[in-house]
Amino acid sequence: MSEEPSDLATETSDAKPSSFLTFEESRVLGCLLEKEATTPDQYPLTFNSLHSACNQSSNREPVVDFGTDTVEEAMEGLRYKKLSILVHQAGARVPKCKHTLENKYPYLTKGQQAILCVLLLRGPQTVGELRQRTERMHAFADLERVQKVLEEMAAHTPEPIVRLIPAGGGRRVATWMHTLCGDVVPAVSAPAESARGSEAPAASWRTEMEEEIASLKSEVSSLRDELDSIKANLGL
């Protein structure tokens, strides 16, 4: 198996520093990380498989409808930033897509990589949501362990990989976001709650209920995904 180095010579957009990812690049990178962990027999991915992964209707937020050109351009952008390569496998008719996250973050643990993957695919999330949604990639013992790993990622040098978005300003609970696309906090469409302090208690019944509901929704989505995969393999 040979690996093709990046040869993209075009300039990146002036809209943000070249080290930051575009949204499209973050979705592609997240998909490559996810499929490597959950379907290793089908990884690296063909462009067709990567296109389908980006446009999944489950386990994605927001759901997108990327064209093939968008996915290919995002892969080129990642290659330029040394975060992906095209792999030429013996007997394969087409090159396949593979991430090279280790070029930028060589010492990420499996747990850290799983958290980053889910943040790339689903945006800001609570500690409880992250524990549930990373289960297929890495099993965390409890919420305290997830919290500790997030704090390690936030203290990563020379730059943090994640950051905390405190409750308040329309956000009912604290969430975590990745920083690979920059340090811009996503806009909140929900109206701000009445003054209850800038932070919600971590152990409040409302927080626990919301995280349990989110976990159940995520589990249903994962089961639906697995069922779709089985149907596809059976040609149904």
Image: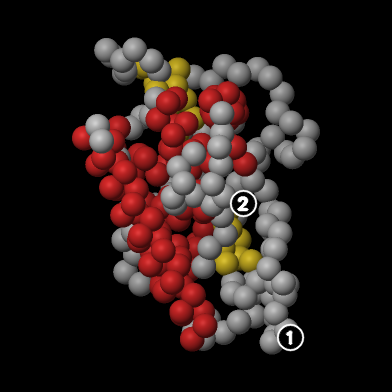
Q: How is the image coloured?
A: secondary structure
**Element type at marker 2?**
loop
Residue hosting label 1: 195
Callout 1: 10 Å neighbours few (<14), some, many (20+)? few
**Disc 1 residue type (three-letter):** Ala
**Element type at marker 1?**
loop
**Who's the residue at 65% across and 17% down the image?**
9
Counting from the top left corner in percent of width and height, residue 25 is at: 58, 36
**Disc 2 residue type (three-letter):** Thr
Counting from the top left corner in percent of width and height, residue 159 is at: 62, 51
Q: Nearer the viewer, mark 2 or mark 1?
A: 1
Q: On the rendered structure, is 191 left or right of 105?
A: right
Q: Is residue 73 visible?
A: yes
Q: Is residue 215 above or below residue 185?
A: below
Considering depth in this image, is 97 or 153 the residue closer to the camera? Answer: 97
**Who's the residue at 35% across and 61% down the image?**
219
Q: Is residue 96 above or below residue 177?
A: above
Work out which quarter of the rendered image holds the N terminus and state it: top left
Residue sitting farthest toward the left: 234
**Label whose residue precedes the other's in the sequence (2 or 1):** 2
Counting from the top left corner in percent of width and height, residue 91 is at: 27, 12
Callout 2: 10 Å neighbours few (<14), some, many (20+)? many
Splitting the image into 4 quarters, where does residue 80 fall?
top right
What separation in Å lies between label 2 and label 1 (alpha carbons)? 29 Å
Counting from the top left corner in percent of width and height, residue 136 is at: 32, 54
Q: Is residue 102 above or below residue 188?
A: above
Work out which quarter of the rendered image holds the C terminus and state it: top left
Residue hosting label 2: 179
**Who's the residue at 45% across and 67% down the image?**
214
Considering depth in this image, is 20 or 61 the residue closer to the camera? Answer: 61
